Image (cartoon, rainbow, N blue to C red):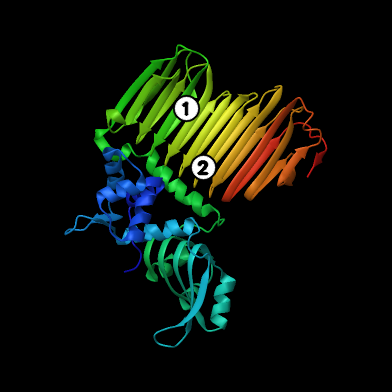
Amino acid sequence: MGVVCMSSEGVEKFLKALAHPVRRTIIRALAEKGRLSYTELMRLTGVEDSGTFAFHIKVLQGLIEKDGETGDYRLTSDGWRAYRVLEILTGREEEFKEKAVEEPSGEKEVVVVQDRISFTLSKSLAEKLRREGKRILIRDVVVVDIEDMPEDLLDEVLEGIYDVLSIRVSKDLQHIVELKSHDVLSVGGSTGFIGGIVKGIVEGVVKAASIASSLKGEKNIHAVRSVEVKEKPYSLDISSDASSMSIESGGEDLLVVEGDFYRQEDLDLKVRDGGVYVAVDEGNCVTRVPSGLERLSIDSDASAIKVYLDSVDDLIMRMDASSLIVSLSKQGVSRIKLDGESSSIDLSVSYVEYEGESFIELDLDTSSLKLLINIPEKTAIDAKIIEGYGVIEVNGLSVQHYRDKGYEEASSKLCIRVRNSSGASKIYVNRKCVGQASP
């Protein structure tokens, strides 16, 4: 059959379907149980509201289908492919299996590589296979990178590629790969850092989210909603699902949300419990916040969130398959806490002089993190990557744990803790003068 050619809208729909934990639970349940009724799936996912659950079922169209006789749900072929991707990304399948099998013709031995997050077919490996008279078959891998090599070399050693999310290969070799690929979502692009696989998936989800309203065509509704913030300081709670949102400084007393939405009910804005609550579903909007913001809480699923503020005392964020950009330009003593999974995160925090201890606590999984800190000269820091691949750079010094001597006694200090399982983290700390540090 060759490559499964999908439109950009089709790929975005596939990625969005995998973005929410409820939908991932549905896919896994059907893979493990075979067929389940609507009521059984609701009970397994823990969703009590029928309307909310119906929305998730609708998003999964194409991955699940109804049995015409029983009315139960089951996975489609694309649903099974989604299930394999989920199993690989969460480490439930074996990291690597390699075995030799005989071609039906018996002419050459075929090496099979399967059940991996990523695999690179390098030129040196291809040459080795040719010298040994072998061919390679790649299947059930999320992302495959193929290095540049002579066309005749790739054609000779590549047996086939099956059930792969994406193949990254140069244009000169793309025609060979397309002829030998089956059940592949996309072919093309360039090779890159293996850890970028998760980021690539996230970027696809975010792209789908950010253009969600434009895909609706003429049914877009442009809305402007506002509430007056009478009590200060105040808190702001934001919930975003498959949306694009920018959070910016606004006027003195009025909090304003403006953007495009599919339906009026896709935007919920109200004052409650001494704070403001904003919920956006499949929208593209800007939220302008008045002065006096003390606590900002963001809950994001498959969304692109941008935060541009001077400062906030307490910033709490939860990201799932989302893109987050935060820029705080005048941060004082404060706490920043972020829990994230399969997300792309870019934080830039510039601190002014303050007395006390500030905290940045990041607990991530399979995410890409870039953290840029600008800190006053007298502020002591204790920065550590607890888990995951990454590096901390303090004025040119690259380490996994940096701690200024005399940290405990310092009057101004910043504690940074990063856990990023199966992810990559880059932390940059800039200040004019760095005291003697201990590893």
From this viewpoint, is residue 187 visible?
A: no
Q: Is residue 378 left or right of residue 3?
A: right
427 w.r.t. 129: above or below: above
Q: Amino acid at mark 2?
A: Gly
Q: Between residue 122 and residue 323, name the one nearer to us.
A: 323
Mark 1 lies on residue: 247
Location of mark 2 (residue): 340
* Image quadrant occupied by the C terminus: top right
Residue at the extreme right of the image, as rendered:
436
| Quadrant of image for the N terminus | bottom left
User: Residue at horizontal 29%, vertical 38%?
Assistant: 49
Decide if residue 118 is on the left or right side of residue 182: right
Q: Amino acid at mark 1?
A: Ile
Mark 2 closeness class: few <14, some 14–19, many ≥20 residues within 10 Å: many
Q: Residues within 10 Å of mark 1 (few under 14, many from 20)?
A: some
Q: Position of residue 122 (x, y in %)?
A: 56, 68
